[in-house]
Amino acid sequence: MEKVFNPSAVEGKIYEKWEKAGAFTPRVEKGRKPFTIIMPPPNANEDLHIGHARFVTIQDILVRYHRMRGAPTLWLPGADHAGIETQYVFEKKLAEEGKSRLDFDRKTLYQMIWDYSMEKKRRMESQLRSLGASCDWTRNKFTLDPAIIRIVYRTFKKLFDRGLIYRGNRLVNYCVRCGTAYSNLEVDHIERVDPLYFLKYGPLTLATVRPETKFGDTAVAVHPKDKRYARWVGKEIEATGLLGKFRIKVIADGAVDPEFGTGVVKVTPAHDPVDWEIGRRHGLEVRPVIGLDGRLNEKAGRYQGLSVEEARRVVVEDLRKAGLLEKVDENYKHAVAVCYRCKSVIEPLPMEQWFVKVAPLVKKALAALDKGEVKFIARRFDKIARHWYTNLYDWNISRQIVWGIRIPAWRCEKCREWVITDGATPERCNKCSGDRLVQDPDTFDTWFSSGQWPFATLQTARKGDFEYFYPTSVMETAYDIIPFWVIRMIMLGLSETGQVPFREVLIHGLVRDREGKKISKSKGNVIDPLVMVKRYGADALRMGIIWGALVENDIALSEDNIRGQRNFANKIWNIARFVLLDRTVKKAPPNADDRKILGELTTTIKKVTKALDTYRLNEAAAELYEFIWHKFADVYLEKVKGRRAEAQPTLELVLKNSLQLLHPFMPFVTEALWQELGEKELLITSPWPTVER
């Protein structure tokens, strides 16, 4: 044996040996309950980060453990095309080259992003291997696989036929920079200080942060109980504006805060979600004055063509000159909606989009939670899921981007009706038999396709996989995508299969730096998992990344933590070198020291098994560290140096069991030492230790 464990020299060879042996591919054994995890597919657009390393470690520990326990174990890997995420990253790459998405036709841009994603996907899969992910690559999936797309189309048509998908003209969250609409869940809110402008509207004065949208006003509103303005309610007032005199109706609505500004607000249904609802209740005209390019349109008169920011500046100056600006509060603090990707301010715009009617789906999902068909391991996340379910709006699934699954909807130019298919191009309109059909250019929201991931992957893998492995055992993922992904998988899984997609949900927390701060490039505290693997080995990173905190909690990680676990790997290596240095055996009954270490081994097996069964991975790791380093190495090994030959059977038994127990956590060093022991089978497929020996 080498004097020191050298991860870089053995990890690649060991992984190749596992893969060639088919160790990751389960056998379907009827009558035996499988253990199944569908990997949350990493985005095929960038290298894996430390958050990916955490989920890979957690899932691989569970998978290796259940495989050793004898369950037919499937960990199905995949990659996500990631829609706007990938297109955004690719557009940044284009910008560095002085180019834009607008420089290319749809087909060319799609192919360019495809080539980029395939390169990143291959790199990402190599990185998963370097982390030790023992997933079944023979069942590897991509969200743009033709078979997956067919499932997504089928789901869309079935939901449409059931009346759960509709085409609606609604106010949506639109990012001018990204050129697409988003659902409510994809909008971030930041606190900002902006001027609050007090504008004269005839006999009334109102307050607004958006004077540039005044050309789209279709009413002014007050609170029904505000006696200051009771005499104006229901009447039209005449006012002077920047485009001349105009008349506008005063309405009363409970959504108006009488403490805001003067208690009077302008109502612009086309450009504010609260105003949209007010307008819907009062039957107000929707008058858009901002286009998809983020510029004012012809309804703004001489201000047409100005961007929102430019228009605000010019309009305020002209209002001041015209004596229509009463005052300005420069310190108004409020929440502003921004794009979750590029952080541009979101423009609420009325658009025709495809929506999922969520109420019936939510009802079934909540019933499944109530019945315990899906269980969140940490109960607080069950409450979070229920909160999102009870506050969901109908889901906008249209995206105005190229990269993704194009919506299988065609509009008849003759009667303007929509023809929905399961992907096939229709020849004629169902209603008027017209043959001039134009496909919707929009693509599906990525979360609509990935929300079908558990059943779509298994239905398109091997024959019988869906029937055997579905519902899956556990969904392990990060808490920040509970509303985006987890709750939608439950909704769509129940809708399309009649069963929940997974029995348990294990949520993991964030990886933070040693001071507990969020990791980000701007803070310079990024921990690159691939650099750590090269420097200290995958085993050290894996142990460091689960050390000291329950799965569901955030962890504080530093390079020192990882270096410390590298030392643990070296300690195990040195223990094995001592045990295997001289394998001479002298028959003798076990003495008190032998019996004690065997008893402690039995206790460790029980504790580690129980901890893994209850997802307390950090406790299992700490128990193994304590047993191997201190009880086995520091105490027992020191005591037997004078009776080495008599203790050799106990030494080898404890070492063998230790390697088996530690294998899910530190697979490479344990497999390397298992081979040094001369075992014929691979450690990865060996049985889990039991207390009976």
Image (cartoon, rainbow, N blue to C red):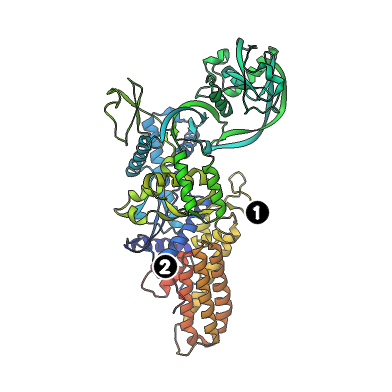
Q: Which of the pair 290/416 is nearer the observer?
A: 416
Q: Position of residue 328 (x, y in %)?
A: 72, 23
Residue 295 seen anywhere in this rendered image of the structure: yes
Q: Which of the pair 580/175 is nearer the observer?
A: 175
**Circle 1: element type:** loop
Image side of residue 249 versus residue 437, left or right: right
Q: Position of residue 267 (x, y in %)?
A: 60, 22
Answer few, some or many: residues within 10 Å of disc 1's Cα (few below 14, many 20 plus, some between 14 and 19): few
Q: Amino acid at mark 1?
A: Glu
Answer few, some or many: residues within 10 Å of disc 2's Cα (few below 14, many 20 plus, some between 14 and 19): some
Q: Is residue 152 above or below residue 688?
A: above
Q: Position of residue 344 (x, y in %)?
A: 56, 32
Image side of residue 58 versus residue 217, left or right: left
How many marks the image carries: the answer is 2
Q: Nearer the viewer, mark 1 or mark 2?
A: 2
Q: Amino acid at mark 2?
A: Arg
- Badge number at residue 687: none
Residue under the point 70% across and 13% down: 323
Q: Which residue is mark 1?
A: 515
Image side of residue 295 versus residue 500, left or right: right
The quadrant in which the C terminus is found is bottom left
Q: Which of the pair 163/642 is nearer the observer?
A: 163
- Badge number at residue 69: 2
The quadrant in which the N terminus is found is bottom left
Q: Is residue 621 above or below residue 483?
A: below
Q: Which of the pair 521/449 is nearer the observer?
A: 449
Q: Position of residue 247 (x, y in %)?
A: 60, 12
Residue 43 seen anywhere in this rendered image of the structure: no
Q: CA distance from mark 1 to mark 2?
A: 38 Å
Is tag 1's residue or tag 2's residue first in the polypeptide sequence? Answer: 2
Q: Is residue 535 above or below residue 599?
A: above
